[in-house]
Image: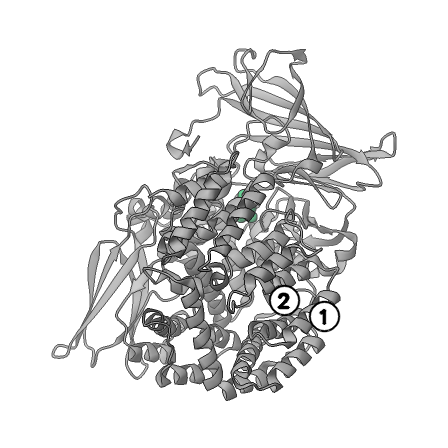
Amino acid sequence: NVIYRQDYLPPPFWIDSVDLTFDLDPAKTRVLNKMRVRRNPDVPPQALRLDGEELNLARVLVNGQGTSFKMEDHTLVLENLPEGNDPFELEIFTTCAPAKNTKLMGLYVSNESFFTQCEAEGFRRITYFLDRPDVMASYTVTLRGDKTKYPVMLSNGNLVEQGELDDDRHFAKWVDPFRKPSYLFALVAGQLVCREQRIVSRSGKEHLLQVYVRAGDLDKTEHAMNSLMHSVAWDEARFNLPLDLERFMIVATSDFNMGAMENKGLNIFNTKYVLASQATATDVDFANIESVVGHEYFHNWTGNRVTCRDWFQLSLKEGLTVFRDQEFSQDLAGEASARAVKRIEDVRVLRSAQFPEDAGPMAHPVRPDQYLEINNFYTVTVYEKGAEVVRMQQTLVGREGFAKGMALYFQRHDGHAVTCDDFAQAIADANPESPLAQKLEQFKRWYSQAGTPRVRAEGRFDEASGTYTLTLSQSCAPTPGQATKLPFVIPIAYGLVAADGREVASGMHVLTEASETLTFNGLQAAPVPSLLRGFSAPVILDHDYTDERLLTLLAHDTDPFNRWEAAQRLATARALKAIRGGGEVELDAPFVEAMRTVLRHPTLDAAFKELVLTLPGETYIAEQLETVDPQRVHVVREAMKEQLAQQLFADFEQAYEQNKDTGAYRPDPVSSGRRALAGLALAHLCLAARQSGDTVWPGKAYQRFKDAGNMTDRFNALTALVTSGHPLAAEALQRFHAMFKDEALVIDKWFALQASAPDRGGNVLPVVKQLMSHPDFNIRNPNRARSVIFSYCSGNPGGFHRADAAGYVFWSERVMELDSMNPQVAARLARALDRWKKLAEPLRTAAREAIARVAAKPDLSNDVREVVTRALAD
Ligand code: ARG
Ligand code: ZN
């Protein structure tokens, strides 16, 4: 049963308040739910239909009296309710089995503690309810449980009462001062400890911040707490949005389907995005924690105070909140060059994950029109492309105009469940003169049309008149269900760069027609166009750049994004040429020299150098091809790396020596950048050694692996050994495991590194199978499953797309195995073959057969069914 956006109807009843009492027991938790319900006067009188899933229903009372009810599938139907619009009391008593909840949706047990995950539709697994985001209620929650097993019992809002009960039990009563939709409900109970911080916000109010973890992990919570304090300060300073709660809690759990969840006042996080110490977490982990803590905190306004009317509007909160967390990380990074590095990283994610999604069978608009399972739409399109759509609105109204628009958005919609249209309307109305306001309806096609637009740029210089004309044309390929597209509003930031590097013009053009021509007068010579600066729109830019012009941009562009982009284009062109030409790689001197110049540059940041010297990823390269043999893509990219390693050997040596020591550990952008460059250099030096038989650099890498003072340096050294395939790698891996056997998140890295190692003659799949029978492997733990299975199936194209189809067989078995316990995780894995139609034979046929095998599984979840059905559709 597919759900359509067009079918939205307001709820026939409102639930004004909910009073929940939990008797916590892993095997059988009892839930008493007392609601104040009334009919929605705007809707014709009808039965009340409550959502419920895997619940045992014991009792239903209306105003204290028994009532008739029936079950229709998962729905509890109440037909004989009081007439009229007066509120009545509805009491429902159910039980559920948290210990058996392997889906990790609703109430579940992890490490003997209780956690909840209710977004999107998990609350119905806790009690019968109108489990939809436009029904907002006031919650009172009483938790009762064993004092020793569950000394800490948390829910949303404020703790108003606690005390003793019989039989070594106790209770805690929580009241949330804000109305909220059911997906923001949370409870946690277990043996947890917390780091606390009292802060005074700009308004002078006091707040208590807490980060809860298991007893041994307290020393890894400082960075999360600092990130939270920065988040509070940033939202006040940038958007005037204060913390509206006396108490704000973060709780970490090692069993979590996604990254984290913004439950009102009680965020629940995957440990991966909370726990960090220099010994166990890398710079990337530190940065991710900062951005996820920010993300969930920022949801408190964009998501919680103003929420979604229905799940088709998911990007209303997710796109906007990703945009906000990206801006937060950029603002904290400080320097313009560090901001640019963050922007490049974000664009890299968009282009390597969202562009393929937008070109594949699961393509959908930022505001989807239909779904079978909403969990399948927590996607890079809704999140990352959604963030780009918000970013373009900021670009079109200016930074100040955008802040004004946000203020109007909250003035209009605070406390309500609204739509993407309401958001764009507020930004436009606050800036009536802006191009956004003038083209609002057309701009909103970004919400309704799927697919990545292409912009073709053609330049022409007329020597006689000194005139340069630039013709920009846009198009967008069909996507499932959308055969034709109308033109988008595309902000194109540009500059014109002279051959000697001077900038002769710059500006912003808002492309709205299918084709438009810009004219520039008074030029001495043909300029090099620097287009889509800062990646001003999520489009593919086609332009017949010559190498010479790209080299000019790489050397001189004032826009760091396009400097990086020029290098990516140079590298991509070489990769594509080699792939199409049969696999031989012969890097030309101008390209190698340009890379050398960047590597040796006296003033460029190390972080930026590392980005430039990192070749475009295999997935990104594959997307540029009509037909893909992933193994050939892998071989070519590896060969390019090896040639760079050999030809830039001395330069990598110098880069390594200059950046290897970063002093006392701090995960700031400058020292992280230096560690990243040192790591890249070391990997190349070991790779070069692989060819030459040199043992010096692998030896140095091993030494560094042993002596490193932080996980970034240690893991980079280990990676250099593993990816260069050096014999020392086995010893290092063994040592690494022994060193960190009690650190689950580090062991995840250990698994992931091996599962994503470069494939040499099909050696990875046997390793992956071995890893799955390692005593530390547990498929029920999503982080662990991701570290082995996803790292191989999605993170190792060269190893996965085997000519003998053994990778696909492995994939189909794992999808089916996971489907029976955790459909959400299974459906993510199912997407590893999204782009099967692009594969070269015999891979294509083998992939289709593997997908068909999954599709034929009896009792397939909606989650996986939706993915494989769409994959097989023509
Ligand atoms: N709202 C959460 C976030 O973006 C994600 C929760 C997704 N959960 C799910 N079951 N799909 O931070
Ligand atoms: Zn979010």
Rounded to the nearest whole Å, what is the CA distance between mark 1 and mark 2?
Answer: 18 Å
Looking at this view, name the residue that lies furthest to the right.
Answer: 167
Instruction: Locate residue 399 relative to residue 79 in the image: left or right.
Output: left
In the image, the residue with mark 2 has its CB under 8 Å from the nearest atom of ligand 1: no
Residue 3's place in the image compared with 221, above or below, is above
In the image, the residue with mark 1 has its CB under 8 Å from the nearest atom of ligand 1: no
Residue 164 appears in the picture as rendered: yes
Q: Secondary structure at mark 1?
A: helix
The residue singled out by tag 2 in the image is: 282
Instruction: Locate residue 140 relative to residue 351 in the image: left or right.
Output: right
Could you say where residue 163 lies in the image, as x and y percent from the top left?
83, 34
380 or 776: which is nearer to us?
A: 776
Could you say where residue 532 lies in the image, as x and y percent from the top left?
34, 65
Could you say where residue 154 lies in the image, as x and y percent from the top left?
72, 40
Name the quarter where the N terminus is drawn.
top left
Give the amino acid at mark 1: Arg
Could you say where residue 7 lies in the image, as x and y percent from the top left?
39, 29
Q: Which badge, 1 or 2, comes first in the chain's sequence?
A: 2
Which residue is rendered at x = 53% and y = 86% of the image? 692
Report the disc number at residue 207: none
Which residue is rendered at x = 38% and y = 56% of the image? 842
Q: Quadrant of ligand 1?
A: top right
Looking at this view, name the residue that lies furthest to the bottom.
Answer: 650
Give the image quarter of residue 229.
bottom right
The residue singled out by tag 1 in the image is: 735
Question: For the residue carrying disc 2, how many other residues have a C-alpha within 10 Å: few (<14), some (14-19), or many (20+)?
Answer: many
Q: Nearer the viewer, mark 1 or mark 2?
A: 1
